[in-house]
Every structure is written in C-alpha cells, then in structure tokens.
Amino acid sequence: MMDNRDDLVHILHDTRLNTVLSWTIVLVLIFLATVNFFEGRFTWTILIIFIVIIVILPGLFFCKPSVMPSWLLLLLVLIPIVGNTTAYYFFLTRIPVYISVATLSLLIVAEMNWFTSVRMNPKFAIYLVIVTTLAVTGMWHFMRWVLDVMIGTTFLLDGRSVDAINTAVMHEFIYALIAGIVAGVLFGWYFKTMMKKGTSSIIFPDRGMGASQEHIYSEPPKVIRKLLGLSVQRQKNITKFLQACLVILFIFGIFSRDLHILLRAFLALIITFLPAFMKHRHNLPLDPSLALWITIAVFLDAIGTFWLYDNLARWDNLTHAVSSGTIAAAGYVIVRTIDIYEPEINIPPRTMFVFIPLFILSVGVMWEILEFITDELALMLGIGAFLVQHGINDTMVDMLFNLIGAIVVAFWGTVYLNSLSYNIAEIFEERFDSNK
C-alpha cells in the first residue's frame, strides 16, 4: 500500500482566510462566466465553468467547502480571464494567459494524483505542467486551424498572408514557453515554501499502486520484421548501409561546401551511433528493430536536404511522422523509467496513452519555435536558413503528422519499449542507489 504522504496536497488549504479569498475568486469566476455567456463568448463560458468545477472538486470530495486550493494559485487563473472579459488588449502580451493555463494544468495534475491511481511528486508534476502548457497551446491553435480548413471559420485563416499568421502563432508559442518556465519556477518556490511550513492536515485516502510497478518483461513484437520479413542480421546490415550513405553524404557536404547537408549528415550520424554507444558504455542493448527505426528517421531527414524537401510535397510529412514516432518512443522510455525507478511516482499504462501525445506535442511546439528563431536569425544575418518554415499551413500539417507518429507509438509502445525502460531503471539502481 502507498504512503499517505502526498506533497501535492500543499496546494490545498483549510483555513478561514484561504476559504474566504478562494470562494470570492470562485464567485467572481461565476460572474465572469455569466457576462461572457450574455456577450456570446460561449467558449470562454464553458472554459470558466470547467475551471470552477476543477477548483471546487476537492471540497466536494471531502464534503467540506473550506478545503480549497490556495487563493494565490486561483488569482493566477483569474487575472487573465478578467482581462479577456473587460478589455481584449488588457495585457501587452499573452504570457499571463499561458501562466493561467499552466496553473490550471497544475490543479488538474494534482487532482489526477489525488483521485486516480496516478502518483506524482511536486518535481515531476511541475515538469508535466510545463509540457502540458506547451501541448495545450499547440493543440489549441491546431484545432482552430482544422476548423478553418474544414468548415470555413476564421479563427486563424482570417485573410492575412500565411506567413503573417504563422509569425503570430510562433509568437504565441514563444509566450507559452516563457509562461511555462516562469510558472515552473513559481510552483517550485511555492512547494518549497509550503513544505518548510510542515505537513498538511489534509490527507487523502490510501490508494493501491496498481499493476504499473510490476516488474514485467514482455517479448517485444518485431514490428519491422513482421511487416517486411527482415531477419535480425538483415536489419543490422540495413542500418550499417544507411550509416555508410550518411558518411558519403557528409563527405559530399564537405566538398560541395554546403553547410546544410554537412550539418544534417553529421547530426544524423551521431544519432545513429547512439544505440551502439549505449550498448558499449552502459551495457544497454537496443533491439535491432529499434536501432533501424532510429536510423531510418534521421536518414530520411538528411537525404531530404538534397531535393526532396523542396520538390516532393509529402516528404516533409513522412519525415515528421517517422521522427515524431522516434521522439515519442524516447518520451515513453523516459517517463516509464522514472515510473519504475522512483517509488513516489506511479503512472498506470493506460495513462501513458495520454502522456505520449502531450510529450510529442510539446516537443513539436519547441521545434517550431526553433525553426522560427533560426529563420529570423538567418534573415537578419543575410544567410540561407538552415530550418525553413513555409507558412501556417506547413506548420500545422507538421503538427498533424507529429501527432500521428505519437499515436502510433502510444498504441504499441507500452509493450515494445517496456524491457528497455526496465534495463535503464536497473542501471539507475546500480549506479545511484549503491552510492547512498
């Protein structure tokens, strides 16, 4: 059985001052929901009602209205809503709005921790909040773009040029990244301060850890072998052949003095040798299918530098789907390893289906920010862009194929990558626990 100690419970308070201030903020939220409803802002009305439910849920659980989240956290949620309702340009940037999103994400993550079999410590919760803030921002703009394309709304595609819209969306992504980092620092300070004051008097009922901590080794399905009829040796040979092609590409980049080809081939080569490095340095063998998958992902991206990205419309989509699958697999292994190694953390397998798309969406947002910044720097310096964006439609299609790759991994990754996660957790135990 799990220990009743739960550091995330420091979000909640049961004091007279906090009760008065928190319920005052709830009443203001209800008022703002009413104002937005009569002004025809139904999306904001639904959002505010959802926030109110999240806020009062702990009190309903304990049948005690005085148990409420800290009024300081609720204030972070409230301020941007007041600004949006009273004056659209209340803030110079939308960073406060995304801090509000991050705070709401923290409350949702905490309630998952309290009311489900998911178990987290504050540090993991804060990382998850940052990831969620970026993912929600990306999904919000993606869904608005889908509605514009499918049914002709004008949420994003409002008559401006595709480049102007893309620039505006990139600014939103940057605001979300800044807000996520700022919120993470604030939440870290908050938990550190609250835990210094002592243990909370609010205790949630004990819950079982479930099956996710069981040490289960599953023989991973040989996906590539099943689809293509490839033996283990043939997979290794194909991997070596693709690496040789990357070496040739690297040499070509040197002689042609093409910095784009040179850098992409060099980075791709480094990535393809990571499985061998992990095996020899940490005694962590990867399944040949997984090594081949990684090599194919970076190889497709590298050779696209020649002609394919500019002349083959779907090549960029293909590379995004394959690469996002690789990144999603890495995200799964990271979270699963933490789940196995850290006794304070419990992530049930069914919950991983949610975490993987969140992770890949957040990585996709950060990648688009990187592309945008490098494009702007290249323009300022008068050099050719290394990573190129082609307007809002290109950005959103990239995110679509990122999501496809993530969903594919989410469906079968819990089986295919389980053994790798346990192997890494064992290495952590051997290296770190032995030093305690």
Image (cartoon, rainbow, N blue to C red):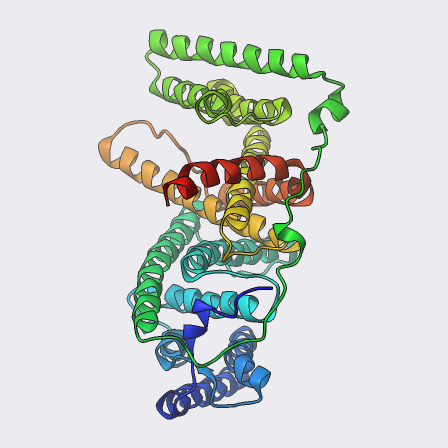
Q: Residue furthest left?
A: 381
Residue drawn 45% across the image and 59% down it: 133
Residue 351 placement, left or right of 302: right
Residue 268 on image: x %, y %: 45, 22
Quadrant of residue 22 within the rendered picture: bottom left
Residue drawn 39% across the image and 19% down it: 266
Residue 393 on image: x %, y %: 52, 44
Residue drawn 59% across the image and 82% down it: 61
Residue 230 placement, left or right of 64: right
Instruction: Say which quadrant the C terminus sits in.
Output: top left
Residue 204 on image: x %, y %: 54, 76
Residue 281 on image: x %, y %: 43, 23
Instruction: Say which quadrant the N terminus sits in.
Output: bottom right
Q: Is residue 151 above or below residue 425?
A: below
Q: Is residue 218 above or below residue 17?
A: above
Q: Can residue 371 be seen?
A: yes
Residue 264 placement, left or right of 110: left
Quadrant of residue 287 within the rendered picture: top right
Residue drawn 46% across the image and 25% down it: 271
Q: Can residue 157 be seen?
A: no
Q: Is residue 401 above or below residue 79?
A: above
